[in-house]
Structures are given as structure tokens and as C-alpha cells.
Image (cartoon, helix red, strand yellow):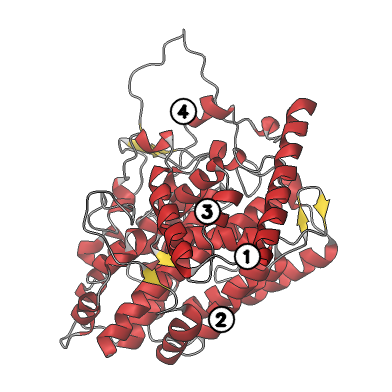
Amino acid sequence: MNSTENSDYVICSNCHKVLRKVTSPVTHDKKIIMSQPSRGPSAYIPEKEFGQTNDVVTLINRLVEEYSTSGRLDNITRVMSLHPQYLESFLRTQFYMLRMDGPLPYHYRHYIAIMAAARHQCVYLINMHVDEFLNTGGSSEWLNGLEYVPQRLKNLNEINKLLAHRPWLITKDHIQKLVKTGENNWSLAELVHAVVLLAHYHALAGFVFGSGINPEQDHEPSNGHHLVVKNKFCVCDLANDNSIENTGLMSNSTENSDYESEIEALMEKMKKLQEEREEEEASQEEMATRFEKEKKESLLVFSGAFDDEVVSTSNASRYIEDPGFGYKDFARRGEEHLPTFRAHDYSWEDHGFSLVNRLYSDIGHLLDDKFRMVYNLTYNTMATHEDVDTTMLRRALFNYVHCMFGIRYDDYDYGEVNQLLERSLKVYIKTVTCYPERATKRMYEGYWRQFKHSEKVHVNLLLMEARMQAELLYALRAITRHLT
């Protein structure tokens, strides 16, 4: 089967949900608002936001020339170019994983990227790497599905599944099964390379969906294995009236003043928390209690969108097993309590970095630079306000993602998360991080409504890197336990 053209499912090119085709004729008594053909790199961000200075355009062109594996300026790069400093770090790291010397053959790298993207039905990334896979000498037969690939690649299925949805379940036993002696075994170096690729593309799928990345308009399928993205009617159109002309975030002056007061309230909370922190530091017991409270409260963060029927296309499913396996809350009620992952015992800085760098030379430095870049990136602005220290906000976003994955920082007061992140933002974070294929434009527009699009892209970059680091911490801890 070469495309979804004749399947029972289509993919909404606006919210990227997988939908059943409507076979019965549409009745005339229903008013259906059809989305307009997409323009620009994002369905969520007006194209005018990407008008950049000559210096930035020159920098982006240089980066694409130097680090693009496809040789073209893709829509992910265009959206990330709102933050050129970060973009350089991202492209350099991705280029190293895919094109520089490393333990894995080049076509394996792209097939692993396809397997990772398929966990979240990310057609955009799958199509991109189908081309790259073939261009690096991969067999077109492998694109028919997992039953056509070597057994050692099939053996990655379990760790791909767990990393993508419940990384806390990964143990040293999973590592031992992959590196055991035999013709289909993985060396530790190969496995680390594979794990880095899997974590990278799981997280990048979140960025694609969270930023509403559009398919490349000028990118014609070069082979019969592309998944076809159809611009069909979806309920998100009714919810949002997603016509291109209606992309403004503010509709009238009353709403503007309401949004402005939201920003003022957020800044006031940041100031108050800073003062409280300086006056009195919470005890370790209190900090632990606040973490557990926030972890349990993350259970209550849900969206009505999660009730919709979301199914996997047969084309995306061919690259994975157990497509129904998904994220389940770390702190589920009524189940055996899983131990919290304490960053004090196993952190990226003190443990993960050195292990990954030892087994896959230099990748640790590149990843570390990327993590630090996004975490420290600031323009000291917040919406229309200047000279604002946003450190507290950035840390709350990063640590909330880790909290949902059961990772706790002993020196962080999780009470700040509850104070700083409004409910609509928490819904958005949880969706983009845990169920990215369910992200919608309404969720994107529903939080921080006065903030600039570039600031929301920065949020997505933080969520992406926090998720990637969380996955790596669990996998690298399991490898460490295997080694000791």
C-alpha cells in the first residue's frame, strides 16, 4: 500500500489528527467551515511573523548550507529560525547524529528516525526520512514495514515504545536483551546512538505538532512510499474557524486588556515567589511533599480532545508494533507506586553526559550545548514588557515536563509550577509532551494569549529538550546499571 489515498483514514493538515473518512454525503443543513489551503511554515503562526532581517536570513542560509541533511530549507528550520542561536545548536547536533562518523550505518539512522516518528504518527518526519533513507542507500523493501527489516532493527521496537511513552519502565534487562551475544546483538555504542536518535525524534514530533508545522508545499514525493497528507474537513475547523485570514490572537480591545492583566498577574507572581524564596527556604520534607502534590495534580490535567477517536494510519503503523501503547500517567492511582527518579542520584550533568560521550564520541558535548542553549535562552522580554528576568518561568516549564515523567530535583520548589503555569498551559504542555499527535491550534492559542509567537515557539523548544533529556536519563541510567 503506497499511500493513505485509498485507506479509511486521512490526516487533518491543520491539527494533524488522524480521522476516519466520511463516506456518507454531507447534509445541507450543516454549515461546515473548511480550512483554507495552508500558507507558510506553520498552520498556527501567520507567515508575516517570519519576515527576518538580512543578517538573520544570511545566517539561516549558511546554517542550511552547512548542516541541512536534505539540502533544503524545511519548515521546521523556518519556525526554529525565530531563535537563530538555538537553531545553530540544533542543526549542528542533528547533522552529527545523521551524517558524521558514528557507530550506526547511515541508512539505519534514518530508519530509526522513521520508527521513532511513527510512535506519534508524525507523517511530516516520516516522509522526510523516507527520502533520506533511500538517498543513503536504504532498501525500498524496508519501507513496506517492519517485517521486511533485519531482526536487529526489529529488536529496537520495545525500547522505542517505552522511551516514547513510559520511559520509567526501561530496565537493565531491556539493555541486556539488546546487547546479548548473537548475530542480532547491538554493541553498546550502537545502542547509545540509536537511543539518542529515538529520543531526538520522539521529542521533535512534539515540536512539529505543537508548532503546527505544515507539509512542504513544493516537496513532491520522490517514491511510492510517502504518506499522503490530505487537507480534509476536521472538527478543529469548526472549533477555530481556521481560515488563514483569521489568525489574529486578539479580537478586540476588551480581550486585549484582559490578556494584559493576565501578564501583569503572572509577573506579580514571579516577583512574589522571588521575594518568598529570599525570605525563607522551604525544608527538604516540604519540597518533597510539593513535588508529590504536583505529580498527582498532573493526573487531573486533561483535555476534551483526549476523548476523540484517534487512530493510527496503516501507513504509519507499518513501522511500529503495538500502536495502541501510549503514555500513562507516572503517578497513576491504585497502582503499585513507582519510585521517583531523583536527579540528585542520576543527573544529566553528573552521570548521563559522561556516559553518552564515552560510548558515542562528542555527542554529549553537542547535546549539552543544546540543552543549555534552550534553558538559558532569553531576550529579557515577556509579551510587551522588557527587562524581565524569565529564569523562573523557563525553569518551571522544564521541570514540569520532568515531573510528568517522574523526575524530581531536590533543590526545586514545585509549588512554583502551580503558581506560574495556568491550567490551559498545563493542558498544552501535557499534550505536546505526552500525546503530541493530539495537539490543536485551539490549545496553542488558548494559553498566554498576549505573548508573541516567537515566545510560544521558545516554549515548544523547552518542552522538546526537556522531554528528550528525560528519555535519555532513563535509558542511560538503565545502561549504567547494566554496566555495573
Front disc: 4 or 1: 1
How far apart are the alpha carbons under marks 3 and 4?
20 Å
Of the numbered discs 2 and 1, the one sitting upstream in the chain is 1
Q: Determine whether label 2 and label 1 are within 8 Å by CB.
A: no
Q: Residue at x 70, y 40 (%)?
A: 262
Q: Position of residue 258 (x, y in %)?
A: 73, 32
Amino acid type assigned to the residue bearing label 3 in the image: Val
Q: What numbered label is drawn on residue 208?
A: 3
Q: Residues within 10 Å of mark 1 (few under 14, many from 20)?
A: few
Q: Residues within 10 Å of mark 3 (few under 14, many from 20)?
A: many
In the picture provided, is 82 more to the left or to the right than 299? Answer: right
How far apart are the alpha carbons under marks 2 and 1?
38 Å
Of the numbered discs 3 and 1, the one sitting upstream in the chain is 3
Q: Determine whether label 3 and label 4 are within 8 Å by CB.
A: no
Front disc: 3 or 2: 2
Residue for badge 1? 280
Marker count (numbered): 4
How far apart are the alpha carbons under marks 3 and 1?
41 Å
Of the numbered discs 3 and 2, the one sitting upstream in the chain is 3
Does residue 112 sit above or below 388 in this rendering? below
Q: What numbered label is drawn on residue 235?
A: 4
Q: Please state, as top left, top right, bottom left or bottom right, where the C terminus lies in the image.
A: bottom left
How far apart are the alpha carbons under marks 4 and 1?
49 Å
Q: Position of residue 351 (x, y in %)?
A: 43, 85
Residue for badge 2? 366
Residue 10 placement: quadrant: top left
Q: Position of residue 246 (x, y in %)?
A: 68, 30
Does residue 233 sit above or below 483 in this rendering? above
Asked which secondary structure carries label 3, the reply is helix
Amino acid type assigned to the residue bearing label 1 in the image: Glu
Nearer-the-camera pick, 97 or 288: 288
Q: Residue at x 64, y 64 (%)?
A: 277
